[in-house]
Amino acid sequence: MDLHIHSPLDEDTVRKLHAGDMVYITGTVYTARDAAHKRMDEALDEGKELPFDVRNNIIYYLGPTPPRENRVIGSAGPTTSGRMDRYTPRLLSMGLKGMIGKGKRSPEVKQAIVDNKAVYFAAIGGAGALLSKAIVSSETIAYDDLGTEAIRKLEVVDLPAIVVIDSEGNDLYETAAGKFAKE
Amino acid sequence: MKTVNVKDITDAVRDMCIEATHYLTSDIRDALIESSQNEESELGTKILRQLKDNLDIAGSDMIPICQDTGMAVFFVTIGQEVHIEGGSLTDAINEGVRRGYTEGYLRKSVVGDPLIRENTKDNTPAVIHYDIVPGDGLKIVIAPKGFGSENTSRIFMLKPADGVEGVKKAVLTAVKEAGPNACPPMVIGVGIGGTFEKCAMLAKKALTRPINTSSDIPHIAALEDELLTLINNTGIGPAGLGGRTTALGINIETYPTHIAGLPVAVNICCHVNRHSVREF
């Protein structure tokens, strides 16, 4: 099913998303990848606040290329989500509702997705030029020194993604290959 | 004797960095278009079309095809009768990378110390492989490598008794474990033989051969064909979301090896299998 959804997410929206649905996301999403996740995790260890409130929000695992003059952002496709797995359950327990990336998640992340009624989307890996067209504004809000790995607040319009793990724990990666496999 | 000035090398490398990250070679582009016409999965077909649209946008709007513009890997083939003037060849290549990645708005993805992990902010140093040959030619190939797929690559130190079946199993194991993480459809470079490091080099180099070509060795060419079928039979499909297009191509390079060993390296690349060549 094709669905147009808004971010930040709400529980009703998350509940109606099923693995395999194609979604077009409009609203605010935050970028964070390896180095930003490590820093956020350290901040929480030290009892500090995160650079943004993760509640109901979506994190896009993205490190874009620099924008050319008069452009919002450069190439902007997803990075491999699995590298963020060790940090993710903690963020989900704090209310993070969605993640956009690509690739498999750990059993711990899947369980945390179910426990916290969240959703994991895949954007198409290697389509960074195409995906950048859905981003209408970008503002670095934290960890500027990390360059491409800084946290950015993005406004997106109809960013295309696919529901891979839904709030009931269905995982499209586990079922999709079997349908097209041949001996 | 031929003389080449380092300035010309730096200028060429700068341009190659930008070219390789914005335009794919025709073999990959053609394979992507062909696969979108043959894909059985509806979602897979949609994804393959989007990847083709992505290539068009990258070229026309000068936005890198993928945001991971890679670590710059070079294969330099230099004739014994070539004289490099004006400085160090390695420095000239790194200066070209520095300029290409800065002036070309490419992502700086290299950290200096692998454990301290501070970004070098200009994507240097490059990884450069030199090969010295007779004659007065100088050929530079750049292959910027993204790490989504690089991280899924594998080396298997097989036993001679494992034979060709062991090789097939190794390649399929690497592909299945990589799955959606490697941004399929993949391009797969395989090195068989040599030593631990030699087979890895062969696998990397195999990725720079056009995917519409076959090995010169008949039984290896047949193995390439068989493995491509087996890989596409996994059903992993575009973006790992199911389908018949798991790989666009597989290239195998071989080298003599030791009586006790059968090293196999599988270097996995995504569909953004970039390279650019200059000859002096």
Image (cartoon, coloured by chain):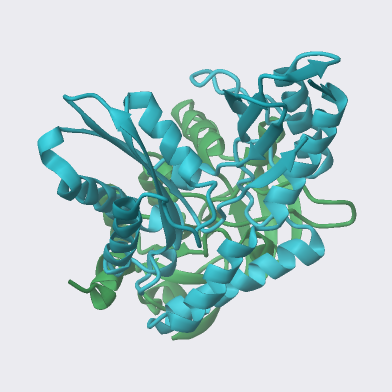
Q: Is residue B102 above or below residue B233?
A: above
Furthest residue toward top: B87
Instruction: Please indicate, yes or no, whether residue B207 appears anywhere in the rendered image.
Output: yes
B80 up-or-down from A114: above or below: above
Q: Is residue B61 left or right of residue A170?
A: right
In terms of image quadrants, where is residue B142?
top right
Toward which corner of the image does residue B94 lie, by quadrant?
Answer: top right
* Residue at 42% from the left image edge and 50% from the top image edge: B216
Across and down, in percent, residue B21 comes to: 69, 50
Q: Position of residue A99 (x, y in %)?
A: 48, 57
Extreme residue toward the right, this view: A70
Pick the front one: A138 or A20: A20
**Residue appearing at x 40%, y 70% in the figure:** B245
Residue nearest the observer in this picture, B230 or B44 = B230
What is the total number of numbered labels drawn onto the structure image? 0
Please name the residue shown 51% across and 21% down the image. B114
Q: Chain B takes which shade in the image?
A: cyan
Q: Position of residue A44 (x, y in %)?
A: 47, 33
- Which quadrant does the N terminus of chain B fall into? top right
For residue B10, side relative to residue A59 (left or right)? right
Image quarter where the C terminus of chain B lies is: top right
Task: Examine the rendered structure and indicate whether residue B206 appears above or below residue B193.
Answer: below
Q: Is residue B247 left or right of residue B124?
A: left
Give residue B226's position: percent from left, percent from top: 28, 62
Taking depth in this image into account, of A4 and B192 the one nearest to the observer is: B192
Which residue is at a point 35% across and 64% down the rendered structure image?
A117
Asked if residue B210 is positioned above or below residue A17 in the image, the reply reads above
Q: Colour of chain A?
A: green
Any part of residue A22 in sight: no
